[in-house]
Amino acid sequence: MKRWETGGGHVIHQLMGGVGNVYALRHGEDMLLVDTGRIYGWKTLFSRIEGLDRKVRPKALVLTHSHFDHAENAARLKMFYQLKLIVHRSERHYLAAGDSPLPAGAILPTRWIMRLGGRLAGPLFRYTGVPADIAVDERLDLRPLGFDAQILHTPGHTRGSMSVIVEDRVALVGDTLFGVLPGSVLPPYADDIPAMVASWRRLLETPCERFLPGHGREITRALLEKRYAHYARRI
Ligand SMILES: [Zn+2]
C-alpha cells in the first residue's frame, strides 16, 4: 500500500485500496484514521492498523461522509479503539442510524441506475449505526489532537462531505473528488454538483499539491485546476 510523507513529520498510509480507500495519518505517537471501507474488509483493515505499530493506537476517526462504503466499520473501530468519531454536523444522525440517504447520479448512466434501482437497493446499504463524538461545522483544527491539520467542510457529494488538509500540502478529500478514471475527478454520484464544484475551488484555495480521494488514485493540483476550470464554466 502507498504512503506519502508531507515534509513536516506527517506520514499518510493508504491502509485499504481497491473499492474504497482508507487512510491512516501518523505524526509521532499519534494516529488518526480517515474513513473505514466496507465491512468485509474489516480483518484486513484491522491487521493493517495493528501492523503499522502495535504501540500506536488510532485516537480519532474522521468520516469524510456517512455513506456505507466509508462508514461501515465505524462502530467496530470505535468499540475496539475507543477513538473519537468525527463527522459533519449535518450527517451525525445518519451515522447514528447507519442509514445515509442514497446519492443522486452525477452523470447519465448513474442517474438512470439510481432512478431504476436506488430505492430497491436502499436496505442493502444500511450499516451498524454509532454516535459521533465531535460534530464539525465549517472547519475543525486538528492541532489539539496532535496533528498539523484541519478539516474543511467541502459539501456537494453529500451535504456534510469534508476534507482533511494535512500541513497545507496534502488533502484527503473523500468523494469530493474521484480518482478512478484517468483525466477525470468527477464522482459518479453527487447530491449537488454546483456545491461540489464550489468545494473544488475551496480545495484549490489551499496550497495543497496532492489530493487523495476516497476511490482511486492520487489527483494532482494541475488536474484539479483543469477540471475545475471546465466545470466552473458550465454551471
Ligand atoms: Zn459517497
Image (spheres, rainbow, N blue to C red):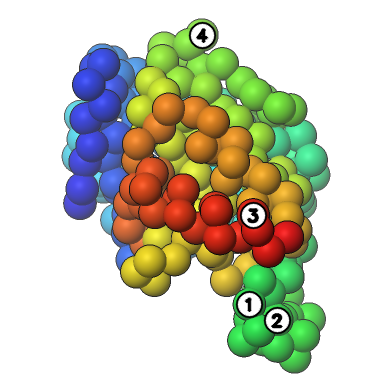
Residue 202 lies, in percent from the top left, at: 60, 36
Q: Amino acid at mark 4?
A: Pro
Is tag 4's residue or tag 3's residue first in the polypeptide sequence?
4
Q: Is residue 102 left or right of residue 40?
A: right
Q: Amino acid at mark 3?
A: Ala
Is tag 2's residue or tag 3's residue first in the polypeptide sequence?
2
Q: Residue at x 39, y 54 (%)?
A: 223
Q: Are marks 2 and 1 in contact (CB under 8 Å)?
A: yes
Residue occupied by mark 2: 111
Mark 4 Cα shell of 10 Å, populated few (<14), some (14-19), many (≥20): few
Check residue 232 in the rendering and tell me which mark sits there, or answer none. Answer: 3
Check residue 144 in the rendering and tell me which mark sits there, or answer none. Answer: 4
Q: Amino acid at mark 2?
A: Arg
Q: Amino acid at mark 1?
A: Ile
Marks 1 and 4, Cα distance to the nearest angstrom? 40 Å
Is tag 3's residue or tag 1's residue first in the polypeptide sequence?
1
Q: Residue at x 73, y 75 (%)?
A: 122
Depth check: give the residue in front, 189 or 182.
182
Element type where label 3 sits in the image: helix
Mark 1 Cα shell of 10 Å, populated few (<14), some (14-19), many (≥20): few
Q: Is residue 102 left or right of residue 186?
A: right
Marks 4 and 3, Cα distance to the nearest angstrom? 36 Å
Residue occupied by mark 1: 107
Q: Residue at x 74, y 28 (%)?
A: 137
Q: Residue at x 66, y 35 (%)?
A: 153
Residue 61 lies, in percent from the top left, at: 50, 34
Q: Are marks 4 and 3 in contact (CB under 8 Å)?
A: no
Q: Is residue 159 left or right of residue 170?
A: right
**Residue 12 location, quadrant:** top left
Q: Is residue 211 above or below residue 7?
A: below
Q: Are marks 3 and 1 in contact (CB under 8 Å)?
A: no
